[in-house]
Image: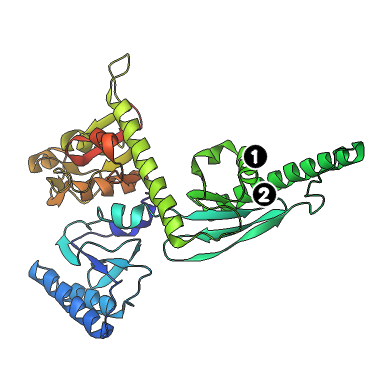
Amino acid sequence: MDLAFLQPLYEHPGPWASVYVDTSRRTEDASHERRLTAEALARELSGQGADDATCRAVREALEELRLSPEPPGRALFARAGGVVLDPPLARPPRRDGARWAPLPHTAPLLELAGEDPVCVVAYIDRKGADFELRSAPARRDAGSVSGRQWPVHRTSTVDWSERQFQLKVENTWEHNAGEIADALAVAQEETRADLLILVGDDRARRAVRERLPGRLADLVVDAPHGIGSRLLDEDVQQARAEHVRRRATRELERFHAARHPDAEGRSTAVEGVPALVEAAREHRIDELLILPDGPDAPREVWIGEDPDQLAVRRTDLRILGEQHSWSARADDALIRSAVAIGAPALSVTPAAGAAREEAPVGGLGALLRWS
């Protein structure tokens, strides 16, 4: 997950109100339910010590939210009487909740908003293709491409002239596959799609796949249905979920390999809070890996005003020269450090089976930028 969108949260000091709410529930009296939820979460924040202005801002923002299955949830981050960021969620939280703390509680976003692959679905035939952009909240047209329209059909005769015609048909197919592949690569670049789903007969899909740039090879999957069928939402969701699982598994495999020291005794992966805190202070985190229900995620660390001011013990911050310090969750503090240095973060929860056993000890780990 690219964390750049969280940057506004770290441009201001805390404390912060962090709220996660399910907007997918539909009732006969939706506005009344929305008001009750807003009041309950505002009271929850007040009980934790939040100021009246921030509680009021959160309550008003929640009352204005539209109950809708798309997006199915919303997060709110507020301070000093105003909402600073309110990202949509790709899936609803397990329960509505609010937290008042020195840092915004951003760790749940890795599961609720982080892995929501955008897909380009390519409906391919031998004359061209139509592209459709599919994401959790919507679908829309993403363009089309038309290749040569003639000749595209073979004949059953075998005389010399017909064999020449067959060759022209083959050339048309090959040319059109190249045109489709080029257009699909452009569509992926323009939409920044995470996944390319090919729909069509076996030969058409294979021809296009072979002509796509190598950088897209890991993004391409074949649809479960043949040509002529528009993909159902559940088909797309299955492909997206499988893509997320494969990526989490792949990153865990990288992490496992990086754990082992090289010939010079250096490793490019760390796990456990003390090692991660040291790597964060040295700006060495290349990718942060988090198992949100891991035992180290809520572990207490100490922070100062700047992302570099991070320590396992409060006295360590004083040694570093920081006079002001606050207690924070380890996962939230490490995400703040990752945002500051432009490192991504990933929830490894989707990885199943043996790969999950390779998860960082305590549920927190990182791949490093250098040994």
In depth, the one of 44 and 162 nearer the eye is 162
Q: CB under 8 Å between callouts 1 and 2?
A: yes
Residue shown at 32%/45% (left/top)? 346
Instruction: Find residue 277 and report its horizontal and vertical position in percent.
Output: 20, 38
Quarter of the image for residue 47 reads bottom left
Q: Which color scheme did the rendering employ for the protein?
A: rainbow
Left or right: residue 259 compared with residue 53: right
- Disc 2 secondary structure class: helix
Instruction: Find residue 229 and report its horizontal and vertical position in percent.
Output: 56, 59
Name above or below for residue 304 compared with residue 282.
Answer: below
Instruction: Find residue 302 and report its horizontal and vertical position in percent.
Output: 13, 46
Disc 1 to disc 2, how far (Cα)? Answer: 9 Å
Name above or below for residue 172 compared with residue 12.
Answer: above
For label 1, the residue is: 211
Which residue ends up furthest to the front in the rendered image? 157
User: Which kind of residue does numbered mark 2 sit on?
Assistant: Ile
Left or right: residue 156 compared with residue 34: right
Which residue ends up furthest to the top in the rendered image? 263
Sequence order check, earlier mark of 1 and 2: 2
For label 2, the residue is: 180
Residue shown at 73%/53% (left/top)? 127
User: Which kind of residue does numbered mark 1 sit on?
Assistant: Arg
Judge the density around disc 2: few (<14), some (14-19), many (≥20) Cα neighbours within 10 Å: many
Residue shown at 82%/41% (left/top)? 166
Tell me if I can see residue 11 in this picture: no
